[in-house]
Image (tube, grey):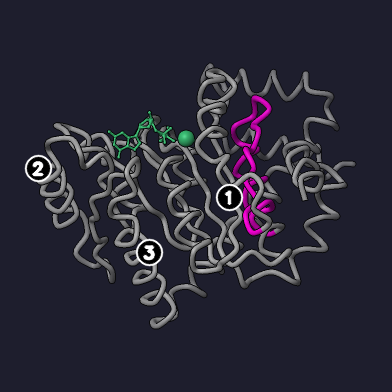
Amino acid sequence: LARLLSAVERGGPEAHEVGRLTYPVGGTAYTVGLTGAPGSGKSTLTAQLIAHLRRQGDEVGVLAVDPSSPFSGGAILGDRVRMQDHALDEGVFIRSMATRGHLGGLALATPEAVRLLDAVGFDWVLIETVGVGQVEVEVAGAADTTVVVVNPGWGDAVQASKAGLLEIADVFVVNKADRPGVEETTRDLRQMLELSDHSRPWLPPIVATVALGGEGIAEAWAAVLAHRAQLEDNGDLIARRESRVAAELVRIVAERLESRAREVCRGEAYEDLRRDVLDRQLDPYSAADEILAWVGSQ
Ligand SMILES: Nc1nc2c(ncn2[C@@H]2O[C@H](COP(=O)(O)OP(=O)(O)O)[C@@H](O)[C@H]2O)c(=O)[nH]1
Ligand SMILES: [Mg+2]
């Protein structure tokens, strides 16, 4: 499994072969994304959720997608230390996804890695991501249920909102509830949710946890299960998964066309064209016409 995941990370023909084999046999695992600012307690919470699920006898795969890891070795080490309780458990598989300096690549590699864990039979796939930046938020939102982790304290809810996390949240966890400000943060979140979108079929519940001490874990998981039940009952789970795959297909086609175009013109003409667009010498649509013409001419 570790080797196959490495192949998926590398991309290319081997990854495509893995994808070809896993795609038809998947679809049974339920994916839960955990996102939020660095240090909010996502890894600690993930470790607690693993323990919770293992007590029920469920098997769980975990992907830790943390683009900040290459810059702070401590983050990776921290995750390992916290999650090592489960290192010898056959019912748990934990993997840190590498970005190889190409953040956009994560958007393609992550769903493929999820399908691999799904295909080998995990009941649950947990995906820990850092919710900062557009691609990260996109990756974080690509789960059946997305849990947004915030901390008590002035402005944390506002930060989450600015980062675009309000839109993708199905469940809010106010972690570090051993600190003051839980009520204020909960109230801020509720207010922002009420202001944001009245057409939501699901109002995200807000659960307080102390991940470090294991408090509120059962409640947080119950909120995930409630969201899942709602998605399954109204048909939204199928709709969500379909629109995710449709978006993935578009991304794959775009990525392939782009890399094909770069191949055909060996990078230079492509860069010139890009420069022209950046300098406002050429509009993006005309540039795209030229690029697609290169691909078509081969
Ligand atoms: N006080 C307190 N600290 C916590 C809690 N949960 C996690 N932490 C600490 O917060 C720090 C960051 O946690 P971590 O799980 O690595 O956060 P991540 O970056 O979001 O994955 C660590 O030092 C944890 O021990 C909590 O509920 N209360
Ligand atoms: Mg972490």
Q: What is the spatial separation of the Cα atoms under label 2 and label 1, in whole angstroms?
A: 32 Å
Q: Which residues are magenta?
A: 91-115
Q: Amino acid at mark 2?
A: Glu
Spot occupied by residue 77 in the image (x, y as percentages of width and height): 56, 26
- Of badges 2 and 1, nearer the viewer stands 1
| Label 2 vs 1, first from the N-terminus | 1
Q: Upstream in the sequence, badge 3 or badge 2?
A: 2
SS assignment at label 2: helix
Query: Ligand 1 is found in which quarter of the picture?
Result: top left
Residue pushed farthest right? 298
- Which residue does the numbered mark 3 point to in the structure image? 224
Q: Nearer the viewer, residue 185 or 99?
A: 185
**Magenta span includes 242:** no
Image coordinates for residue 203, horizontal then vertical, percent: 24, 64
Residue at position x 37%, y 38% from top? 41
Q: Which residue is at a point 64% across and 55% down the rendered structure image? A: 114
Where 122 falls versus 14 (above or below)?
Answer: below
Q: From this view, report whether residue 139 is shown above or below residue 54.
A: above
Q: Which residue is label 1 attached to?
A: 62
Residue 112 within the segment the image draws in magenta: yes
Identify the secondary structure beneath mark 3. Answer: helix
Answer with left or right where residue 153 lies relative to residue 36.
Answer: left
Say whether residue 28 is left or right of residue 44: right
Query: Which one is earlier in the sequence, the residue at label 3 or at label 1?
Result: 1
Residue of label 2: 184
Cα gap from disc 3 to disc 2, whole angstroms = 23 Å
